[in-house]
Image (cartoon, rainbow, N blue to C red):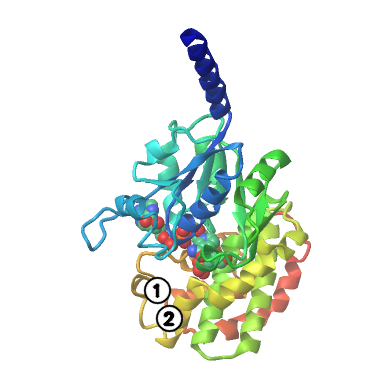
Amino acid sequence: MAPAFEDETASETNFSDVEQLHKSKVTVVGSGNWGSVAAKLIASNTLKLSSFHDEVRMWVYEEILPSGEKLSEVINQNNENVKYLPGIKLGKNVVADPDLEHAVKDATMLVFVTPHQFMEGICKRLVGKIRGDAEAISLIKGMEVKMEGPCMISTLITDLLGINCCVLMGANIANEIAVEKFSEATVGYRENRDIAERWVRLFSTPYFMVSAVQDVEGVELCGTLKNVVAIAAGFVDGLEMGNNTKAAIMRIGLREMKAFSKLLFSSVRDSTFFESCGIADLITTCLGGRNRKVAEAFARNGGKRSFDELEAEMLQGQKLQGVSTAREVYEVLSHRGWLELFPLFTAVHEISTGRLPPSAIVEYSEHTPRLNVLEGSAQYC
Ligand SMILES: NC(=O)c1ccc[n+]([C@@H]2O[C@H](COP(=O)([O-])OP(=O)(O)OC[C@H]3O[C@@H](n4cnc5c(N)ncnc54)[C@H](O)[C@@H]3O)[C@@H](O)[C@H]2O)c1
Ligand SMILES: O=P(O)(O)OC[C@H](O)CO
């Protein structure tokens, strides 16, 4: 009887090996505030969905904590990112890994969620280190500006790593999702609806409702540009200009977001601005985001303390995206001769760099009728 038993065990093992081989393996590249919440969301789903491996690997940019311990080790001991998401359990199937190459090597689904300024360096380190059949999604709100022009982070990932990349953006203040308050998000995809649906399944929970639209650039530009408008909203708050002024800034900002997106990519759809990634993210960021908060402090101090100083003091290692995005947008605008067409975006950069006082945010935004020039206008790239 012994051999028969052995045979059965062998065939069961083989079957389970084959099953395991076909399961998607997820790695989250990034472990800041949103990166940690994304890992938590995903980890709750991989336990329930049979097409995914239970374990979710999370790459941690290693840091030594004031206690002298390594952040990655503390995350694995406590199942909690004590620096970037204190007080929240990530799920026991989240494994923090400080070795970038090791973290990604077996992954078939890569979730990129770091501050945008680090992504080019990370992608360069990953060339030749990931699986050829991997799929990616970027949760990163930001862009790079190259000699050739602006480059969205999803494009950077595709160009450097040779893999397809969707995006996920939305009205998603991480700390609220961490405690499971209801919100929505938008996946942007290029062609393959099946892959978009796989991402939707991986992220969706009863409190995190995800839908997909075929407009990668539109979704990603909404997430990127709203951070510039949030800086403007923070200036308005710091100057105590009131709700009407803030609403005006948000309206003008949305108009500039749409015009800029459509000038860069004629494929961008109007309807995308009505998804969670559009108007909803703009509202939540201008009400409760980090960009708004630090910009408010900047204006209260009359622009005398720099954003770098305030960011370090107020965010304790978390990073703003709006100031660098305003600079990147400004580079595109000045290179293409569009500065006067985007007075709000232009003013945010000039105020952030100290060339104009915070009060210029309203003076400069008076010229919005110029934007009419852009409505339904030609493509520039
Ligand atoms: N936090 C939110 O509420 C939220 C929500 C939606 C989208 N996002 C977007 O997600 C992206 C990531 O933001 P986050 O909130 O997870 O991060 P964060 O700002 O909370 O944390 C900064 C992260 O950068 C890491 N880091 C520092 N120096 C680094 C380096 N040299 N190389 C690589 N990494 C380094 C830190 O370890 C930390 O993980 C951003 O594009 C942001 O706009 C954030
Ligand atoms: O805190 P912020 O300003 O980086 O914004 C966070 C999210 O992008 C809101 O959706």
In the image, residue 334 lies at what x, y percent? 55, 64
What secondary structure is found at the residue carrying circle 2? helix
Numbered disc 1: secondary structure: helix
- Numbered marks: total: 2
Q: Position of residue 159 (x, y in %)?
A: 54, 39
Rendering coords of residue 320 (x, y %): 45, 66
Q: Is residue 150 left or right of residue 117?
A: right
Q: Which residue is mark 2?
A: 298
Farthest residue toward the left? 68
| Identity, as a three-letter code, of the amino acid under mark 2 | Phe
The residue nearer to you, when weighing 290 against 3, is 3
- Asked if the beta carbon under badge 2 is closer than 8 A to the nearest atom of ligand 2, the reply is no
Do the numbered discs 1 and 2 sit on residues whose CB atoms are within 8 Å? Answer: yes
Residue 225: name its quadrant: bottom right
Q: Which residue is mark 1?
A: 307
90 vs 203, left or right, is left
Q: Residue at x 38, y 36 (%)?
A: 102
Q: Residue furthest front?
A: 1
Please report the residue visible at 62 percent of the width from the left and 58 percent of the height from the top: 221
